[in-house]
Amino acid sequence: MDCKIVAATNNKNKLREFKEILSPLGYQIVSLKDLGIEIEVEETGKTFEENSMLKAKAILEATGMASLADDSGLEVDALGGEPGIYSARYCEGSDADRVAFLLDKMKDVPDGKRSARFVSAITLMFTDGDIVTARGTCEGKIAHEPAGKNGFGYDPIFFVESYGKTFAELSPEQKNMISHRGNALSELQRQLI
Ligand code: ITT
């Protein structure tokens, strides 16, 4: 296959994780910034999969290159699956503001009811129209307060039982081994073999 792929994302942390996970497998990940392209794809889909597909298609059409998109988010059971596909837009402001907003919503939720999962839907779209999709999840719990400085987004409040730490307290390698995005990209890789 063509090993040069454009990452259909404006999120520099996703781009970094794509490179960390896929470069050792021989894929060359090119960013929109590398290509001097500025596009904000409207995420009008109702599912992670639909939005992932919309991003991959728009970027393939804009670049003429095979494209790799991720649509992802955090599903909190006590909040009926919120923020879900709206994770990046849950409230205005920074990642820290969204973390504070979510923690406030969870302030009366007891330990036993704080289950949550990260979900990632990946779409790899080739120039000949072929499409490969994969979904990955990672189960955890919403912590009572932020901990750790690594990662991005909701990482400081996503507590993973197996490590006894939040995603933000893990090294990039540890996070990628168990994360929703790592799992989705492993599944994608399995489909490509
Ligand atoms: P692109 O659409 O340009 O890829 P985005 O950040 O807008 O970037 P999404 O619409 O898929 O991407 O929103 C994903 C949001 O979900 C992201 O901004 C975080 O708030 C959250 N999220 C996803 N993966 C995460 C992770 O590994 N760690 C922490 N938060 C994550």
Image: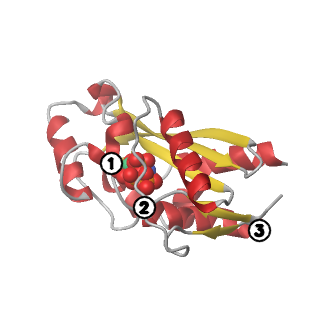
Q: Earlier in the sequence, mark 1 or mark 2?
A: 2
Residue 177 relative to residue 98: left or right: right
Asked if residue 166 can be seen in this view, the reply is no
User: Which amino acid, mark 3?
Assistant: Gly
Q: Which residue is mark 1?
A: 88
Residue placed at 48% from the left, 39% from the top? 51
x, y (%) of residue 61?
60, 53
Q: How packed is label 3: few (under 14 Cα within 10 Å), some, or many (20 or more)?
A: few
Q: Residue furthest top?
A: 80
Q: How packed is label 2: few (under 14 Cα within 10 Å), some, or many (20 or more)?
A: few
Q: Which residue is mark 2?
A: 11
Compare residues 40 and 193 and report the one nearer the observer: 40
Residue placed at 37% from the left, 60% from the top? 152
x, y (%) of residue 69?
56, 51
Residue 16 relative to residue 11: left or right: right
Q: Report if the beta carbon of the residue with label 2 is closer than 8 angstroms to ligand 1.
A: yes
Verify CB contact (< 8 Å) between mark 1 and mark 2. Answer: yes
Q: Is residue 7 above or below residue 121?
A: below
Image quarter of the N terminus = bottom right
Compare residues 29 and 174 and report the one nearer the observer: 29
Q: Which residue is mark 3?
A: 26
Label 3's element? loop
